[in-house]
Image (cartoon, grey):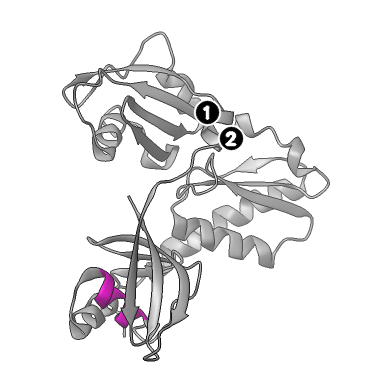
Amino acid sequence: MKTVKKDENASGAFLKRIDELAFRARSGEICSTSFLTPEECMCALKYLAAVKAGISYKADGGYEDAERRVVIIYPDYIPDDALPIDDYLAAVDISTSGYVKLEHRSFLGSLTALGIDRSAIGDILVTDSGATVMLTPPIAAFLLSSEAPLERVGADKVSVGRSDMKKVAEYKRSFDTLSITVASARIDCVVAELCKLSRERAKEVVSRGEVSLNHSDDVESSDKVEVGDTLSVRRYGKFRIGEITTTRKERLRISVLVYS
């Protein structure tokens, strides 16, 4: 039994909002959510798949492996390539001096300190020269305005410029790779090996709701991973399951991509 439960009222309110956007799309509007977490995005897409009459929809975070995405809902007679994506998705480049190493949390903290809601901020792609930040268009316009509201990130002075969305779309995540050998593809076995925990400790981590599989925390220790699955373990990291082969001793060798 999970010790962590979702707030059913919050979930109901979220789906009610998605349903309202779907209703507007059936009436001829092109609608969009703010940036959704992977769990929210999956929930929205499942719901829309069940009520899809008269509508089309897509999730977009600016590049292929984006975690936070907006969901665009539109009449089914509008071709996908005719969507005005720039109305729903934007990006800015935050350039630093290059002398101070800044992390994801530094950029996020500076943006939220300006009063920007987290749901208006998508992925933050940190580079050696700063970061590219996915945003809702109104927030991007705010940061690019003449008032220049963002002047510092951490202890470093920064400048903000418009980012090329075509360049963002070509972004590829970097991964570390590792190979593990386990007796079974069960979640508890895989988590124990990835995080260097005992099997019992891994079961406790799963039971506390600290493990998600494909962005869902409805996970049991006996669930099994498959090729392409995304596995997240709180405080330990995020992993993508690659090739699974069987060794001569009938154990499983799993290739794993580790999100950096």
Query: Disc 2 marks which amino acid?
Result: Tyr
Q: Is residue 27 above or below residue 4?
A: above
- Provide the residue designation for mark 2: 88
| Outermost residue toward the front in this view | 248
Q: Main secondary structure of the magenta part?
A: helix
Q: Nearer the viewer, residue 253 or 194?
A: 253
Q: Is residue 36 above or below residue 234?
A: above
Whether residue 208 can be seen here: no
- Provide the residue designation for mark 1: 137
Sequence order check, earlier mark of 2 and 1? 2
| Outermost residue toward the top in this view | 146
Q: State the SS at label 1.
A: helix
Asked if the stretch drawn in magenta spans residue 192, the answer is yes
The 10 Å Cα crowd at callout 1, few under 14, some 14 to 19, many 20 or more, is some
The image quarter containing residue 204 is bottom left
Q: State the SS at label 2.
A: loop
The image quarter containing residue 7 is bottom left
Query: Disc 1 marks which amino acid?
Result: Pro
The quadrant in which the N terminus is found is bottom left
Asked if the stretch drawn in magenta spans residue 162, the answer is no
Q: Is residue 236 above or below residue 172?
A: below
Read off the magenta span: 187-194
Relative image position of residue 111 (x, y in whole percent): 31, 30
Relative image position of residue 120 (x, y in whole percent): 44, 37
The image quarter containing residue 46 is bottom right
CA gap between label 2 and label 1 equals: 6 Å
For the point 43% across and 13% down, which residue is it?
A: 145
For the point 43% across and 53% down, which residue is it?
A: 37
Q: Are marks 2 and 1 in contact (CB under 8 Å)?
A: yes
